[in-house]
């Protein structure tokens, strides 16, 4: 018998590390980053599927399973809204809440982004792609100092290019502005004081009207994630299974028939349609799991492991691919693979595994220290001294 679902609004977003929901979110963060890296690697070293007259069945399979990068970015936006937006709403109104939030967001970005940009510059110098030198301040030069600074502040694709041709950084422009727009929206709704609300409203309207259309439009996707972090859906396993199947079916259909390249108005409509059942599924998974249960413990360890360095993998894979293509040209005489040669598939997965391994090393060197840097800054900049806190299911 199917129990009718009930929907409840919650006063706080339950970012609980032992909920089934947290396991799924952790797994999706890792899988989404891996999907983007795999998709871009295929695009960089294999010919496009549409350019082949009779692609092999193996290559058709590879192209299909590595073709969900667009959907992966949408999942990133939804989870970011869920975790970042939910976390801020939980502490909004507390002393220095916005100061804590600002330090959290910029340390999250810059602890990984600064070394990534430096590595991108180093790769550009090695492969001979740098023109004008890093001290060039021309904003049109993707390796210029202006581009470097602009990418730190989310201005890529707005006033400067993605630094060094590292094109996945476009989504960080979206994220950066969503991190700014969301607290402004909260101030408008519950800021306290007419003048404060009016100033926040003016700033929010200015940003929404001056940023690129797709940045402002996709803020709605991010907001959906934040809103659903407060919703709990009580239902049975049959309903959850139906939501899972519907979510997968919609993502696959949009992968095959929808807009899968740039963000455009048409892709926004499809992404909204895909997002709703996915968010309903997340909201239905707030039941507690036994952290000591062997199956849950093993799955959670794997999910958390990959989610922890998903950001490093996302921002790092393009310069690593460029460097490996350079090595291929230098030592093998080619930097592209043949979709009709079976052994080249082994090379593809070897390169992909190398990218993942290097991203993990990068995580150990930089991203892993985000919380330590964050707490040091809070202890230095904020009063009273911030108490170090780390929540497993969090945007950190």
Image (cartoon, rainbow, N blue to C red):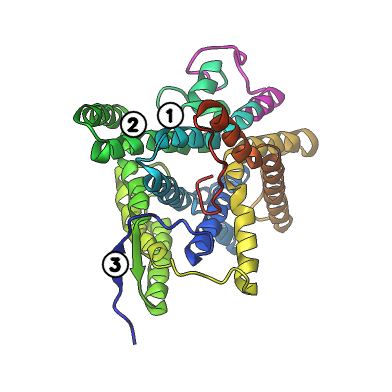
In the displayed structure, 74 sits above or below 169; it is: below
Q: Secondary structure at mark 1?
A: loop
**Residue at point 35%, 64% (across, down):** 232
- Which one is in front, 129 or 269? 269
Quarter of the image containing the C terminus? Answer: top right
**Residue at point 74%, 56% (across, down):** 343
- Secondary structure, magenta segment, majority class: loop
In the displayed structure, 197 sits above or below 355; it is: above
Q: What is the CA distance from the residue labelled 3 to the residue labelled 2?
A: 35 Å
Q: Where does the image place residue 112, in percent across and percent down from the top left?
A: 60, 35
Highlighted magenta segment, given as a residue range: 119-142
Q: What is the CA distance from the residue labelled 2 to the residue labelled 1?
A: 8 Å
Residue 368 visible within the image = yes
Q: Where does the image place residue 324, in percent across and percent down from the top left?
A: 71, 38
Q: Which residue is mark 2?
A: 212
Q: Where does the image place residue 297, in percent across and percent down from the top left?
A: 63, 67
Residue 54 visible within the image = no
Q: Residue furthest front?
A: 384
Where residue 279 sits, quadrant-wise, is: bottom left
Q: Which mark is residue 157?
A: 1
């Amino acid at each position: 018998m199917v129990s009718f679902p009930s929907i409840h609004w919650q006063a706080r977003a339950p970012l609980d590390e032992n909920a089934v929901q947290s396991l799924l979110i952790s797994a999706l963060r890792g899988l989404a980053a891996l999907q983007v890296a795999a998709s871009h690697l295929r695009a960089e070293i294999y010919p496009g599927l549409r350019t082949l007259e009779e692609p092999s069945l193996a290559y058709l399979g590879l192209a299909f399973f590595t073709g969900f990068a667009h959907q992966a970015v949408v999942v990133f936006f939804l989870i970011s809204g869920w975790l970042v937006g939910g976390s801020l709403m939980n502490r909004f109104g507390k002393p220095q809440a916005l100061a804590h939030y600002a330090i959290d967001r910029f340390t999250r970005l810059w602890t990984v982004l600064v070394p990534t940009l430096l590595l991108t510059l180093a790769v550009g110098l090695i492969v001979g792609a740098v023109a004008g030198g890093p001290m060039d301040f021309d904003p049109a030069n993707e390796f210029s100092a202006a581009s470097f600074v602009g990418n730190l502040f989310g201005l890529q694709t707005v006033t400067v290019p993605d630094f060094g041709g590292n094109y996945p950084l476009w989504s960080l422009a979206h994220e950066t502005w969503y991190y700014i727009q969301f607290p402004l929206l909260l101030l408008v709704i519950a800021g306290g004081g007419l003048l404060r609300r009016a100033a926040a409203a003016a700033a929010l309207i200015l940003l929404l009207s001056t940023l690129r259309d797709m940045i402002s439009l996709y803020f709605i996707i991010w907001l959906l994630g934040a809103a659903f972090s407060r919703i709990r859906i009580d239902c049975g396993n049959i309903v959850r299974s139906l939501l899972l199947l519907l979510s997968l079916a919609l993502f696959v259909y949009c992968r095959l028939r929808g807009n899968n390249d740039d963000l455009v108005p048409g892709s926004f409509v499809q992404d909204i349609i895909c997002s709703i059942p996915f968010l309903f599924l997340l909201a239905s998974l707030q039941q507690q799991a036994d952290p000591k249960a062997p199956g849950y413990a093993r799955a959670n360890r794997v999910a958390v492991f990959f989610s922890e360095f998903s950001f490093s993998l996302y921002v790092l894979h393009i310069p690593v691919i460029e460097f490996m293509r350079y090595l291929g040209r230098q030592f093998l005489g080619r930097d592209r693979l043949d979709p009709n040669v079976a052994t080249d598939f082994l090379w593809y997965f070897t390169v992909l595994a190398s990218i993942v391994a290097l991203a993990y090393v990068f995580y150990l060197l930089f991203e892993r220290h985000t919380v330590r840097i964050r707490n040091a800054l809070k202890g230095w900049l904020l009063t009273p001294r911030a108490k170090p806190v780390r929540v497993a299911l969090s945007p950190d």
